[in-house]
Image: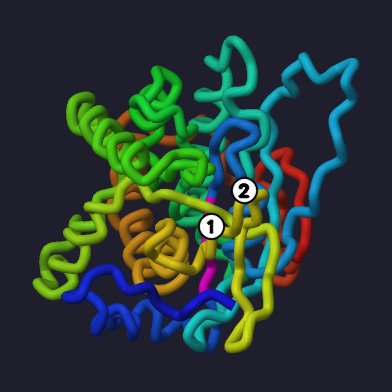
Amino acid sequence: MAPSAPSITSTMSTRATTPRPSSYRYKSEKRGMTYNIMLVGQSGLGRRTFLNTLCEREVIPASEAPNPDTANVADPMRFDTYEVKLEEEGTHISLSVIDAAGFGDGLDNTSCFKQLQDYIEAQFDEVLVEESRIKRNRRYRDHRLHVLIYFIPPTGHSLRELDIELIRRLGEYVNIIPVIGRADSLTVDELQTFKRNVMRDIDFYKLPVYNFCWDESDSDALKENRDIMDFIPFSVVTCDEVLDNDYDSVRVRRYPWGTIEIDDDSQCDFVLLRYILLNSHIADLINYTEDVLYENYRTKKLEVGGFGEGEGEGEADEDDDEADEDEPSSASAKKQA
């Protein structure tokens, strides 16, 4: 099992052992918290093992070996949805993970950007329609994305045009947290250099990645968040085996020359990232989505006329009991875990 909190720096260790106060979180402890994450990145960067390691169970089983006769043909991008029930620090989390399989695998990936943007906007539009009803659905399930984990390939150089375009186009709709997939393919020095190069590109192109310091009202949290910003992009190594030692079980990735303990924060940033996503910053990510990103989208949508004639009407008198089963928000394949 992963530690309940990482040790980031000596100044943060005391604070990291306990979740930061959040009325949103405390109110959600009993009734559960709805939380939506999207994984985006080219094939082979470890999205499947990342999700399995994040949830500490097998959510996505290993895929079969591809047919060699069709291995050179890129599949179109699709959205696969996985529903997972978690409990973190006493809080029940209803986690929905959308995996954008096939992103960036083709020669021309222009359509991928539009598919992603249309998907995110569709979730905003669902909420806007729900808000316009005379009688709202008490069982409505919010599908707005709270965070997008973007996997950067470990090239060791800098961001590619594909990376820059995705962050630039989607940053105003969703909280983007960049991570380096398969960071174990880089040496320690190469990894630090690559991180600096990525942040240099983010600053140069003014790319809208998630700013952990957006709320400056809490001075103590602000210091912690500034320290966290130094870890961006997070280096990720995921687990493929659990070893038992004399003291505890250890999650590792095995190599011919040895193993990497993914819960050792001196070897990768996975523990810190997991703590951020499922514990300390979950309320911040949800609040920023609802209070900033969605409100900005809503304002722009209404300024240009909102919905077309008749859209969102005719549903105001629906009985709440007919909403026990959510309609799928996209042509995604839903799976339970």
Q: Which residue is mark 1?
A: 36
Label 1's element? Answer: strand
Q: Is residue 319 visible?
A: no
> Would residue 231 appear left or right of 309 to someone viewing this image?
left
Q: Position of residue 286 (x, y in %)?
A: 39, 62
Q: Amino acid at mark 2?
A: Ile
**6 relative to 200, above or below:** below
Whole-percent x, y for residue 317 in the image: 64, 60
Magenta stretch: give its range: 33-37
Q: Are marks 1 and 2 in contact (CB under 8 Å)?
A: yes
Residue that mark 2 sits on: 98
The image quadrant of residue 12 is bottom left
Tell which residue pokes out farthest to the front in this image.
Answer: 257
Magenta region, mostly helix, strand or loop?
A: strand
Task: Establish if 166 lies above or below 185.
Answer: above
Residue at screen point 54% across, 68% down: 34
In the rendered image, the quadrant that contains the N terminus is bottom right
Residue appearing at x 42%, y 27% in the figure:
163
Residue closest to the eye, 247 or 169 = 247
Disc 1 marks a residue whose amino acid type is Asn
Pick the quarter of the image with the C terminus: bottom right
Q: Which of 154 and 92 lies nearest the eye of the viewer?
A: 154
Residue 56 in view (yes/no): yes
Judged from this view, the residue extending furthest toward the top is: 108
